[in-house]
Image (spheres, coloured by chain):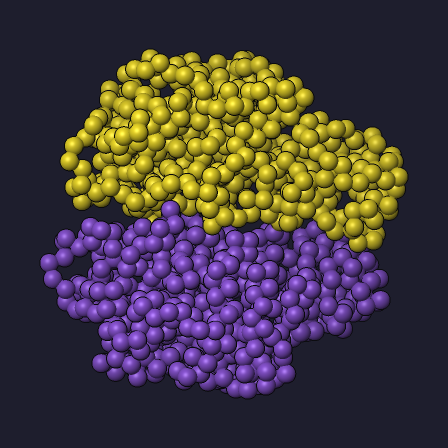
Chain colours: A yellow, B purple
Amino acid sequence: MRERRFCWALPVISRKSTALVKEGYWLLGFMATPKIKRDMGKAASLRPAREVTHWDREADVVVVGLGAAGACAAIEASEAGAEVIALERMSGGGGTSALSTGQLYIGGGTPIQKACGFDDTPEEMFKYLMATCGPGEDEAKIRMYCDQSVGHYHWLVEHGVPFKESYYGDGSYTPTDDCLSYSGSEQSYPYCNIAKPAPRGHTVQQDGIEAGAQLMRSLIAAVGKTTVKVQEDSLVKTLVMDDDTRVTGCVVRYEGEEQLIRARKGIVLCAGGFINNRDMVYHYAPELWRCRYRAASDGDDGRGIRMGMGAGGSAKRMETGCIVLPYTVPKILMNGIFVNKRGMRFINEDLYQTTVGEAALLHQEGHVYLICDNECFERPFAPTEIAAVEESVADLEKSLGMPEGVLQNTIEIYNEHAANGDDPIFHKGKQYLQPLTHPPYAALDYRVENSLYTVFTMGGLHTLPTAQVLDPDGEIIPGLYAAGRTTSGLAAQGYSSGLSLADGTFFGRMAGRHLTDRAVPPA
Amino acid sequence: MRERRFCWALPVISRKSTALVKEGYWLLGFMATPKIKRDMGKAASLRPAREVTHWDREADVVVVGLGAAGACAAIEASEAGAEVIALERMSGGGGTSALSTGQLYIGGGTPIQKACGFDDTPEEMFKYLMATCGPGEDEAKIRMYCDQSVGHYHWLVEHGVPFKESYYGDGSYTPTDDCLSYSGSEQSYPYCNIAKPAPRGHTVQQDGIEAGAQLMRSLIAAVGKTTVKVQEDSLVKTLVMDDDTRVTGCVVRYEGEEQLIRARKGIVLCAGGFINNRDMVYHYAPELWRCRYRAASDGDDGRGIRMGMGAGGSAKRMETGCIVLPYTVPKILMNGIFVNKRGMRFINEDLYQTTVGEAALLHQEGHVYLICDNECFERPFAPTEIAAVEESVADLEKSLGMPEGVLQNTIEIYNEHAANGDDPIFHKGKQYLQPLTHPPYAALDYRVENSLYTVFTMGGLHTLPTAQVLDPDGEIIPGLYAAGRTTSGLAAQGYSSGLSLADGTFFGRMAGRHLTDRAVPPA
């Protein structure tokens, strides 16, 4: 096996991001991918097997993409005795997983949850995910994942992924090397009334917020302990299908040559999402294009999804995305209130930042402000402009071009209730209720064009919990599997942080197991 | 040719709907399709041409589905000299078009617009559609359609579609035999500031609101004057594709037998949308499933879209739908205000009912009420329950379970401005601004579960303005065309009434022309 290099664009980012992360501007790490190539290449046109005269390489299982999903698929298949080739288009594995914060949504009573004093059960986790991962939630996937979540934690640990037995607090990421945090809306109305809250964000142990790199170092090291053959610098151009519409291999561009690789049992597409493909985003998810920051590596150009579609796979919920509106750090900002362009509130501000982001972008035209008074104002962690500062709310609404009286009215009502520790209209948690009565008043600019809405796509191939890809009639396509953001996963819509790495690692594993006729692991 | 029967489910509907239409409950016409079959059959698995040993019939062009799109495709192709077979799964053509209100969105200065004293230009029409048909609007289609719209009107008239030279007024449909009406948000904020308003809804001349039947009688009569061979009771099961990935024919179920029909030049899929396919709606557009009334014939089970996907076509914007919230008749109801479950306004109530329906369902959880006082209350045209009636607004908000004070506050502010003929917050037109001060106050129940939200799907195959179907890479699939609600059309999202019949008739024609190498008609 060639020596693996952990480059995954980190050299590109590091100069920029090391300094920025120190200033707390971690989101800018994703600025490494501002350039969008117009031509994303062709991927959907199949190569008929009858045109293949020879195979350059072959294996039982071929994995496309060596991010979290691909690594786990490769490990499971290899450990079950299959011969596996893993193909990675970059010069090193990692993909978008390596650029992430390294947080996985795991629960149901993990050792770390127990050690930190949190009760959780698969049933409470199931209720929370069913309430938040829709509409259109995939109950079968959610059910299986909740039942298997603790086992999945152990599998990750056994394969060298480090987690520290510690609780960090609330938040989408952990700037320390701590593990556990609330990474969704578990504690907020209405979800706190639907399922017993528990923190389920499990961040890989790593100082700083780029724990995804550590996750991928661990998983790729685990791949290295197997017989998996990793081939880098290998762009999979398209799939090979035989006359029985079975996927039997793929066409690869490797060292300037075309290479044909046979997959005796099947191919697993783990090639990420499509946020870096401008045309696909425009056609399938145009709202998402308005977000300036794409949480993705260059590889997220939808090749995997297009290859799957070309093989007859149905892509579903292609309009959906994880939309992060970064306002929750420092937490005191949650004492402020979000208003739309008319000066009206529209949400409880203590909901998770992805839920607020979705509401702001999709329901409020991406035109919202966070209103603070002098008591709760602080510079947000993510760089944010101030749209206006005024000594009175009346002047503030004027500066913002809002209709006269509405913001004043909104704040008057909010303050009246907040003084009683109450928010009967939106039910924000009591700890964030403080009347906004201390001038000056500031409006933080969370308009989508001026702010740091961060996004990746959530739509993708329609798969069974076994990771088998389905066609538009709901029929299984023989030999074709997919996992991670190449698929529509646990969250058909409505995101809690850690669900994508959960999706990728778990359903990648399920692909590897199904391909080698291993049963789903016991709970 | 067999004698054509105009049955298209009208016998089923008529008993029910004749009485109901008299009472004004036209929407219930669509109740003819309440039963959703779970198994919608298979459509996506191709038949390889090499497995076809003989063709039972052949023609230059095969049209699948004889609704508005299919009829127009067949006419154009036939008039250009092509041999055409049109296949219809029912015992008579018509499809959902025949069940519609027979309104087409046409403008840019038609003879009827002129005769009725309305100025319009292709440019103003373009500006309006570009502002309302997105995000993700298809500029090329909109541009071509606006430039060709007057010509399209003449084509329809030349082919026997009757329009009366008269103006009806505002509204999504015309209960008289009149023609012209505002069928979108042209006169409402903000669109009235973007494009010069003109009525563009052209309803086919027919007493009553089922003018779609007249449209289809006319178009099918026009088909009858050509050499098109119509074959009814013919369900197209799947497409035939050759080794060059060209669509060369289709497999048909006809009189209990399998029939293979060759299409020398191409196939045009005009088989409607998918709102009557429960699984497809759940997977692609789960919000739409909440609407109780589906504006569709049984045939709208997505077969056409699935066949196209099976042939490699990309389906886009599958989450979108036309969502009608029927509250605008009688118009005095627009003097009321819509509020969400918290008692807050969210829209100007004079926007078109599809825009209000989309906002209510997608942005307000489908949980809205129309609040009226005794002056503006009347029984709505569509049957609507009254959620509460009270002598005071305070009691009304209590009855509705709203947080105390919010609805009172909303109405107080609204009344204050309305008394001055002003609505600075949402900009409802002056003619609908009347303070709500006369008790009792009523809340009409426009919650999605209790109301008559009427819906059809707008997502479908991604096509060029020539009606050629594209694959996920944006490549043309040789021999495959589609039009009407089998495609994503003029409105990628954001509907004005008449756009689907416009889409179907116009791009059906473009398919027929492109297949016969005729240029797009001159403007």
Residue B205 relative to residue B437: left or right: left
User: Which one is in front, A129 or A503?
Assistant: A503
Reply above or below: B461 against A277: below
Residue B186 relative to residue A513: left or right: right
Residue A165 relative to residue A315: left or right: right
Furthest-left residue in view? B53
Reply above or below: A441 against B162: above
**Residue at x-position 39% and y-position 82%:** B159
Q: Is residue A346 visible?
A: no
**Quadrant assignment for the N terminus of chain B:** bottom left
User: Which one is in front, A503 or B74?
Assistant: B74
Q: Quarter of the image holding residue A329? A: top right
| Residue A401 placement (x, y as % from top left) | 79, 50
**Residue at x-position 82% and y-position 35%:** A373
User: Which one is in front, A57 or B339?
Assistant: A57
Q: Quarter of the image holding residue A370? A: top right
Q: Number of numbered discs present?
A: 0
**Residue at x-position 29% and y-position 20%:** A229
Reply above or below: B28 against A412: below
Q: Quarter of the image holding residue B260? A: bottom left
Q: Is residue B242 visible?
A: yes
| Residue A31 placement (x, y as % from top left) | 57, 30
| Residue B303 placement (x, y as % from top left) | 33, 59
| Residue B379 placement (x, y as % from top left) | 65, 73
**Residue at x-position 48% and y-position 24%:** A9
